[in-house]
Image (spheres, rainbow, N blue to C red):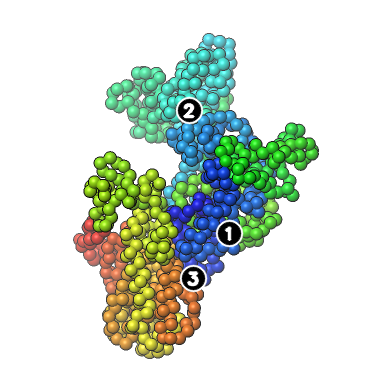
Amino acid sequence: MFPYPSGTLHLGHLRVYTIADVLARFKHMQGYKVLHPIGWDAFGLPAENAAIERGVHPEKWTLQNIEVMKGQMKEMGGRWDWDAEIRTCDPAFYKHTQRIFLMLHEHGLAYQAESLVNYDPVDKTVLANEQVDVNGCSWRSGAKVEKVMLKQWFLKIKAFQAPLLKDLDALTRDGRWPEKVLAMQRNWIGKSEGAQLWFDIFSTGSEQRFEPVDVFTTRADTLFGVQYIALSLRHPIVQQLAIEDESLRTFMERARDLPPDTKEGFLLRNIVARNPVAHVRGTTGPSIPVYVAPYVLDDYGSGAVMGVPGHDTRDHAFWRKNAGDEPIRLVVSAKQGDLPMPLVPRSGADVPIVERGFVTADIEGFGDMTSKQAADEVIQAIIDTGKPALPTANWRLRDWLISRQRYWGTPIPIIHCNSCGAVPVPEKDLPVELPKLPDSFFQGRKGNPLAEDEIWKKTSCPKCGSAAERETDTMDTFMDSSWYFFRFLDPKNENALVDPSKANSGMPVDLYVGGVEHAILHLLYARFISKLLATTPTWPKGYLTNGEPFTRLITQGMVHGETFTNPENGRFLHPDEVDLTNPSRPVIKATGVTPNVSYEKMSKSKYNGVDPGATIAKYGADATRAHMLFQAPVGDVLEWDEKKITGVQRWLHRVIRLSAASWIPDDAVEKFVIPAQIDAKLLNILQELSTSTDAKSASRESLLSVVKADEAKLWTQAQQTIASVVESYSQTYSLNTIVSDLMMLTNSIWDTPHASSITPYLKWYSTAHLIRMLAPIAPSVAEEAWHLLTTCTGQEPSVLTVFATGFPEADLAIVPLLTSTRRCVVQVDGKRKFEVDIQKIPDRVLSQDRQAVAKFVLVELAQTEDGREWLDRESGKIWKASA
Ligand code: ANZ
Ligand code: ZN
């Protein structure tokens, strides 16, 4: 996910781009053609706010920030395809954003509608629902958001809701996308299966007539338990009655300020409703009271609810508050044949039964049916009486409001003409560029600069030629990021957003890495636009499976900073206020008291931010990268503890020293092939054994007689490390365990004693493997080490860069021949817990996947080690084998 150019790189950026860089370098070493692009999500409010505060053009501010951040990224030691760099604020880019808008417009998927929107009175802009927090405040300015009616542009994402939901299924396979993200997407789209039912409405006092009220319910089986109808504040009946009912108007006024979950209600005395099941019974049925209730949402279903206090928690609370102590009927029970007692207040059991079950036996014609069956049959029964009822699904997803009343965004390419209406800007006139305004124009300005630029606004209608005005709204920046990844494949193309043949070969994105904060909106919008492009007739089909843009997704966790608080008053302390001479016992300088230490989301007010540039300057990019990966699995929160970097730094130094160690034999030649000088006996045996598929025990013995135990152990570990590291790089993305695997291999090489004349060769090869495996994580250290290792004999190496050596491949066939037991690391949730030695694992198991091996190991442990205990050093917990 490309960054927003806020001005400085933070540790979150460092983390996400390290992960992506490491994986890109790994794939590159494996011989893949890798595109690892970067660009800038360059439109947006912070630039405009900076412009208003400081009187500097948003573009100037943005471009400066990009330069600074680019410099910082280069210091990270990352390698990006800078040739494909893009900026969304570049007219050459946003020309295509505008074309996508027009494509939507042409297909009736972009429309203008008068709607009640969230308006931020501080930023003076409309906000999407998701930019308003639970307290009704703006995500950015924190101002209390107001509801106002405005004409806005919307994109009809709802037209794609079914495939947006269904195609998530394919992304669950082999953990392609994190389950958590899939669940958030599903929940956001929010499909509820249920029914639409109609309740007739009668006036009690007047001659007034009303349309039947339709309700959406997921529980048609509870229809027999309906005790009231509740209407939202904006329901047409409420609006109609409010004209003449002053007390209703007062209630509606007051309701605006109530919290969304309020159970306040207003009884409409002049009307009653009738349950449609009455027709099934051939009766008129009892009259049901009708309330106005703010807890009913205006924009969900039909803005009306059939109230079932016996089976819904909200309805129950509402009923008790407004109808008082009346007993509440139960019509569904957990057990078939049950006849539960009605709910009475303050009885201790005045709780609704919200689970589905069986319709109670006393309900004629439906008693004892399952909830599911009763729901289906009651709908059919109503239809049979000639009244309407409809099985239907309701979706939580709303169309996407893209209008923003701001300058720094992609202009919406529409011209408003008095006679022709909203006319698309013709293709030849694209892009509609933002006007060039002087810096001073922005200083202290409120409102939408575009709307105030009379010159820019005035134009003529492309259809009839008469005087017309440009649309002055710009697009939500999520629109820019909904398609940018296509552009990397063809960043300079002026005629199309991407050449279809390039899109065909390059899409979908194989691996997408970014923060979980984008789990809902960005990904949903990117999926929407990708589906649009994949279904547009002018676009070649078939290059995107289901129109899904991202095959695999990694969401990296947040980086939390070390936070000091004064235990006496809870105040956050600046690190300068704390004496850190003894890192394990910090002391507040002023008082001598020990501060509370915690890890929290980095923020200015907590003084716990860390500048990645300073860390890199102090410890080097490679140590910073390796530390970052080592401290936590990629998806977890990372508690940034700088003190621990030194351990990683020492390890990297050790790798360098290994590469220039004195034991390196003079004839360990530069070429990355098995040197002819290596002990011929070993070479023969190694080769013979690793190529023969069913190794005979005789050769096994001969190998074991040549290779000393320590040598066998080292070589075994080297091979197993390669296998484990390859799997971590390519499947599990368990980058933290790569670092620990490599640390252990380093130590083993270092510690292996000189047992025979072949030891130096085995150490040389193990070191070569180690360096190649390390290269994606610590590229500079690896290059240096490679150089040392391959030139130690004074010859020019044949392979100048470690990145051209390919990635090591494990020779697992040789492992069982070298050892009679196998060391297994047991991890729980990606964290190393303990190690066990398992008697030889059969080759047929080894040739299967990791799960099969793990299963074998578990069964082995349970049977042969029953009762044995292992200590988990980190948590102090004991793990016990048990059959
Ligand atoms: C009667 C009923 C009985 C309901 C029961 C639930 C349980 P989801 O699953 O989120 O789609 N509902 C319908 N429209 C509403 C609105 N505009 N504002 C607030 N609530 C509304 O929720 C569907 C349920 O939410 C519907 O099913 C309806 O209450 C309520 F034992 O109908 B139910
Ligand atoms: Zn016109």
Side of 190 where 740 appears, left or right: left
User: Is residue 219 depicted above or below 585 in this figure?
Assistant: above
- Residue position for label 2: 296
Q: Name the residue located 49 percent from the left edge and 60 percent from the top edge.
A: 73
Q: Name the residue located 44 percent from the left edge and 57 percent from the top edge.
A: 14
Position of the C terminus, as image quadrant, is: bottom left
Gap between marks 1 and 2 measured at Cα:
48 Å
Q: Residues within 10 Å of mark 2 (few under 14, many from 20)?
A: many
Q: Depth-wise, is mark 1 or mark 2 nearer the camera?
A: 1
Helix, strand or loop at label 1? It is loop
**Label whose residue precedes the other's in the sequence (2 or 3):** 3
On residue 817, which mark appears? none
On residue 29, which mark appears? 3
- Residue position for label 1: 85
Q: Is mark 2 within 8 Å of ligand 1?
A: yes
Tell me which amino acid carries mark 2.
Answer: Val
- In the image, farthest residue toward the top: 205
